[in-house]
Image: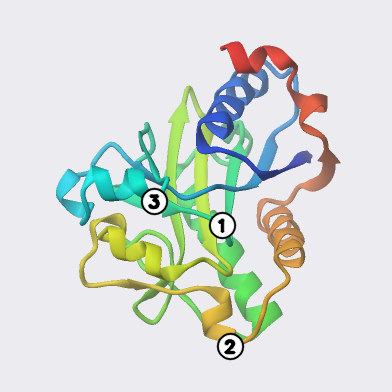
Amino acid sequence: MNLNLVDLGRMPYSEALAVQKAAVERVRNHEIDNTLFLVEHPPVLTLGRRAERKNILVSDEVLHEAGVELFNIERGGDVTYHGPGQLVGYPILRLSEFGQDLHKYVSDIEEVFVRLLLDCYGIETAKEKGKYTGVYIESRKITAIGIAVRKWISYHGFAFNVSTNLKHFDWIIPCGLADRSVTSLEKETGRTTDFENVKMQTAEYFSKVFSTGIVPKKLYEVLDEDYKQA
């Protein structure tokens, strides 16, 4: 089984959301293979289905002045931050081909980063069941996960803090969890990280955990321009 790998570079959140939604339809209709989009966003806050405005700690005016957009979206979870230095992944998968089990799917995404961080950086992490979805180094979250599923096609996904400006998380209570902090790969290793290398490591470990081949593709090879008008 092959997985399309599409590197979107740095893309505004609204455009990446349109890409996802168009890809969901094409994957469902077997017009394209399962696809993993990797992307970096300008600063943005997204609010999942369970999000509460009180978990955003600054006013809309402050966010506007900082150029930060707000989006209410379909994924699970509360409020999260995306921004430069954070690797965001949107797996668009026919989950019927991966066990059709949402708990296993989330656990498998977590496993990608558990293995990657240990094998490539010697960092031991933990997965915690229940409300603490994601990957943690002790109590510090390094990878957040928030998924949505439409007729057993997955979208939304994960956010891996590589060289993220962690001060931006002061704007929110990440994922609504006041007793947890956030961290990044650069903070944990104490050295500058090659973002493009981490991107390739993430794709490699995703393919290992999900037992797929990887086929690099350009966006125009999986979607036509019509997705922008959808």
Give the labeled residue for mark 3: 66
* Residue 184 image point, x, y percent: 51, 73
- Between the C-alphas of marks 2 and 3, the distance is 27 Å
- Disc nearer the start of the sequence (1/3): 3
Badge 2 crowding class, 10 Å Cα cut-off, few under 14, some 14 to 19, many 20 or more, is: few
Rendered residue at 75%/30% (across/down): 33
Question: Label 3 sits on what residue type?
Answer: Ala
- Between the C-alphas of marks 1 and 3, the distance is 14 Å
Rendered residue at 75%/17% (across/down): 224
Q: Secondary structure at mark 3?
A: loop
Badge 3 crowding class, 10 Å Cα cut-off, few under 14, some 14 to 19, many 20 or more, is: few
Determine if residue 144 is in view.
yes
Mark number displayed over residue 190? 2
Badge 1 crowding class, 10 Å Cα cut-off, few under 14, some 14 to 19, many 20 or more, is: some
Location of the C terminus (image quadrant): top right
Answer with the quarter of the image where residue 121 lies.
bottom right
Q: Secondary structure at mark 2?
A: loop
Q: Is 230 rendered above or below residue 160?
A: above
